[in-house]
Image (tube, coloured by chain):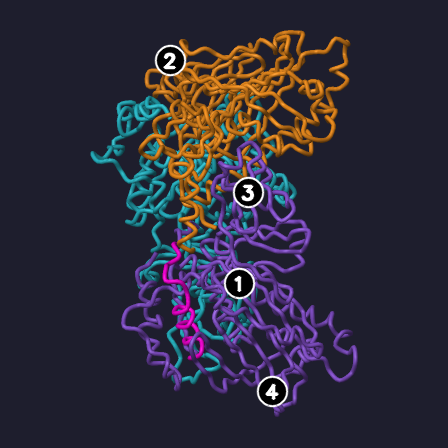
Chain colours: A cyan, B purple, C orange
Amino acid sequence: MYAESALDRRSTDPATSAVADLPAGSANGVMPASAPRDLRRVPIHPDYWYPLAWSREVKPGKAHGVTFAGDPIVIVRTATGRIFALEDRCAHRQVPLHAGVVDGESIRCCYHGWTYDCSGRCIDVPYLGKERLPNGVRAYPCEERAGLIFVFPGNPALAEQRALPEFASVADPKYKTRRLGRAVKCHYSFMHENLMDMNHQFLHRKQMGMMRARSLGRRRGEGYVEVDYTFEREQGKQPVGEALVFGKDGGQNNKDVMTVRTGYPYQTLQIRTSSGTLVMDLWIAYVPLDAAQRTNRTFGTLSIRRPGVPFALDLAWPLLVWFTERIFKEDREIVEMEQAAHDRQGEDWNHEVFPVIKELRELLRECGARTVIPIHPVQG
Amino acid sequence: MYAESALDRRSTDPATSAVADLPAGSANGVMPASAPRDLRRVPIHPDYWYPLAWSREVKPGKAHGVTFAGDPIVIVRTATGRIFALEDRCAHRQVPLHAGVVDGESIRCCYHGWTYDCSGRCIDVPYLGKERLPNGVRAYPCEERAGLIFVFPGNPALAEQRALPEFASVADPKYKTRRLGRAVKCHYSFMHENLMDMNHQFLHRKQMGMMRARSLGRRRGEGYVEVDYTFEREQGKQPVGEALVFGKDGGQNNKDVMTVRTGYPYQTLQIRTSSGTLVMDLWIAYVPLDAAQRTNRTFGTLSIRRPGVPFALDLAWPLLVWFTERIFKEDREIVEMEQAAHDRQGEDWNHEVFPVIKELRELLRECGARTVIPIHPVQG
Amino acid sequence: MYAESALDRRSTDPATSAVADLPAGSANGVMPASAPRDLRRVPIHPDYWYPLAWSREVKPGKAHGVTFAGDPIVIVRTATGRIFALEDRCAHRQVPLHAGVVDGESIRCCYHGWTYDCSGRCIDVPYLGKERLPNGVRAYPCEERAGLIFVFPGNPALAEQRALPEFASVADPKYKTRRLGRAVKCHYSFMHENLMDMNHQFLHRKQMGMMRARSLGRRRGEGYVEVDYTFEREQGKQPVGEALVFGKDGGQNNKDVMTVRTGYPYQTLQIRTSSGTLVMDLWIAYVPLDAAQRTNRTFGTLSIRRPGVPFALDLAWPLLVWFTERIFKEDREIVEMEQAAHDRQGEDWNHEVFPVIKELRELLRECGARTVIPIHPVQG
């Protein structure tokens, strides 16, 4: 509305004034000469394994429709338990195959009965001779691990050489695991930045009290950024819920170290005691659902090491569930506010001053797909 | 997302690979050298009579607002029972006349009281001299028949020479008629294709059992396509509801013939016994409501010949209503899925292999208006 | 759909045929040679004081988020009662400051705790040295008067020289004041035209009976248009609610005069008796909320002079509230219909014949901002 408004904004732009304000140690934080493309318009790279459903969502003899960045995909589990993934459309009239019928090791479209096998080949059109069968639909590599169904949405030739994530703590009986997940209305990059910047403890002050995160150092390598933190309580006492998740405060001498890592495209958060024991192990992925990549579905496993007393963690579990839900809700609300601001502003006005987040943003730009998400003007 | 996806899709495109797969007898099914315009973007042709309301919806002394392809139209029934149709906007401030007051043989806008007669002429502005009256609004030819109010939205000079549909069975006491109608969120062409392709019996397998349609032959002429079918039951018994609508199975020797005809812009479905008696007579029209023609309102009359036993059909009527509602619901859901797929794909990926449907698609393209519906990108 | 439709419309366009139809006395009503820009796309001018909240909406120690023409603004009231207004975004991650915490005389962002004073300066980032503080956000001039919080959204250098409105009747104990307000989904110009054209009494015929407004004369000057009316009852008796608001009918000799004035950007409606006593005094402003200026929030004060009998007005107040709510609802519905018609037509088809409204439209065009509101195609 008023011209100086834009000036105010530009003067707080990281590409201009903020560079000089960088804290020490930002050796990697060099800004490119030309303006970088808007991080919120970088598509996630499809040449990775992405969890698209929980195993329990795909029952035997049923088909389940999901999307990856706007591409509809049907996951089929046959009566024998085998899973496969196809484009979720009949080659004939384009209706979703997930509305169809699982028939032996194939899926039959609900409309005119066209039938596809696990490779996407059309193997039957009820009113057409077998010698005239039309082409079928695309199949996706599909694997099941740790209660998650992973699909490889990119170039299938690359699927084998790309490793699936490990879930060591989930399999280890010394840990108890909670599965987390919900749709969040924002670009996946906001999720990574939220978790990695532990200065956002202020957001959770009602759940956690006033905590100060101290960054011990960060590492950047091929496809990853990670950072270590310790925490100090500034005021108040430790809430019970937090003690369950993060372990009990050692008072002012707490030497537990939290490591947050984005190993593209996944993220982990691990807490180790001074003796090196892994007490908390979070693995999480943010899967874009829509073509604009403005909504992501979160799939996470949160593994907590069982304490010495048997069943103590099981008894405390409901409290832990409540606590993590509260934290997650606050995070969801704030990243959705960030997305709404980006929608209104039409570009990335983010003014980052924290070196590890600057590096994370570079990583997400470098590892993302080369294209740009088109965005439409938001009226309102 | 991944380049080969587009390749897969192209290879199933009827304009390329599928032509060779055509069943015999597709003499008319010649593909044009250049890509045809997208059928889902062909506007319905306005130079026909379209039902825009049921008679019972327009009460004496009341005005009723409808739309035809985004054009707002008000249908007025005066206290004396006369009907007329005008543009549904006051020439002054553009508010809908249907919110106004029927005053004698005219309609008065609710806002400042401007008044229009049945020809659309402005005959009163309460605060302006009669010698200064402004121009009025457009009037539409309007006729009432068989409980439907028909409007001619196109060039009014052509209205007289264009015949209104006949409703012989509706008027005939040997038949009992049910009126069908509902808004369906799709382009009208999906409706025509749905009804004409009887291979879609698979969709209604729960209502009808497994039936196989056999096409006996098809005819194409000026402004129409029609096709004859017989049916064979593949498995299971005939449900009671179906027997009511379609007549009782003659076992494997059922020689009833169903004829489905698109006589632009209407559609009919008739069933005749081997002796030539018309036992079922459906007339149906699909009227686009919005400018994008992505929603149509269906107006249909379903006439069933009364059996020899008096009142038998009346007793069975509730079951027939339930049965037709179930069938209609399944059809509505599937054509809305087709439209949603088209919205996402942005063009017509339909891969048709059935000759009569190929001809129907050509007919709808040829008879439609010459313009192209603009479509907006769908985000999501 | 049909070409003559457009012709019909053009022939009723004020820029062509209607000029000759002008009632006498439209000396100021000269049409420009070139087509004027669409009034519904003229942004309101930001260089005025606009009420953005009621005082009671901003509690001590709290922040309150509002918008002006799509610009988010936070109004903060500190514990000491001081108010200030800032851009409603944190300079860091752009989340709204209104979700933050009022801390002394400053506001702290809820996410990472960045803190801003009343001038918008960033005075604390908890994890950054004070010598490295980034730039802050814009501040807006902000004043409180008559229970309203006024903000100056335009060039702040002009704020002091631009007067705030006076609220003489609100402060005068001889009057009782009702505060009115609601969001209305239309461009602010429809609101001005609605109130100033008293020929729209026809709309309120159920509340007020059939009244005829007679325009006594109008005046146009720098930044204002005003018009005087008297009223005659055409039929029926005066409803009780109306007598309370507008005073009792003097039968056919009613000589009360109503003056409606748009003194840009506000509007007033005053009723004076023949002896010059001000019996009703309405002040109203229409504040665009969204960037497209398709929704406005109305802030009004309606002051009624107390009659001779003590407490009579207080006793009748609930009836008056009910009556004004009914009138306001009818006005809201009709202006929203006007906006919907404009959205569909894509341009201003308004065909105005009443001279004072023609002048009002010119005034709103001249006083509005110089830019043009972009509008997006409406599908449907």
* Kind of residue indicated by mark 2: Leu
Q: Secondary structure at mark 1?
A: strand
Magenta residue span? B355-374
At label 4, which amino acid type do we have?
Asp
Marks 2, 1: nearer the viewer: 1
Q: Pointer 3: what residue?
A: B123
Q: Where is residue C121? Give x, y as percent.
A: 39, 16
Picture residue at 77% right of the left edge, 14% below the top: C312
Residue marked by disc 2:
C158
**Chain ID of residue with mark 3:** B
- Residue A259 can be seen in this image: no
Residue B271 occupies quadrant: bottom right
Q: Is residue B182 magenta?
A: no
Chain at numbered mark 2: C
Q: CA distance from mark 3 to mark 1?
A: 28 Å
N-term-proximal mark, 1 vs 4: 1
The percent coordinates of residue C165 (x first, y second) are 50, 13
For the residues marked 3 and 2, what is the alpha-carbon distance in whole angstroms? 51 Å
x and y, in percent, of residue C345 in the image? 44, 44
Q: Residue at x 40, y 60 (%)?
A: B41
Residue at label 1?
A: B50
Please state if B301 lies on the left or on the right of A153 as rendered.
right
> Looking at the figure, which quarter contains the N terminus of chain A?
top left
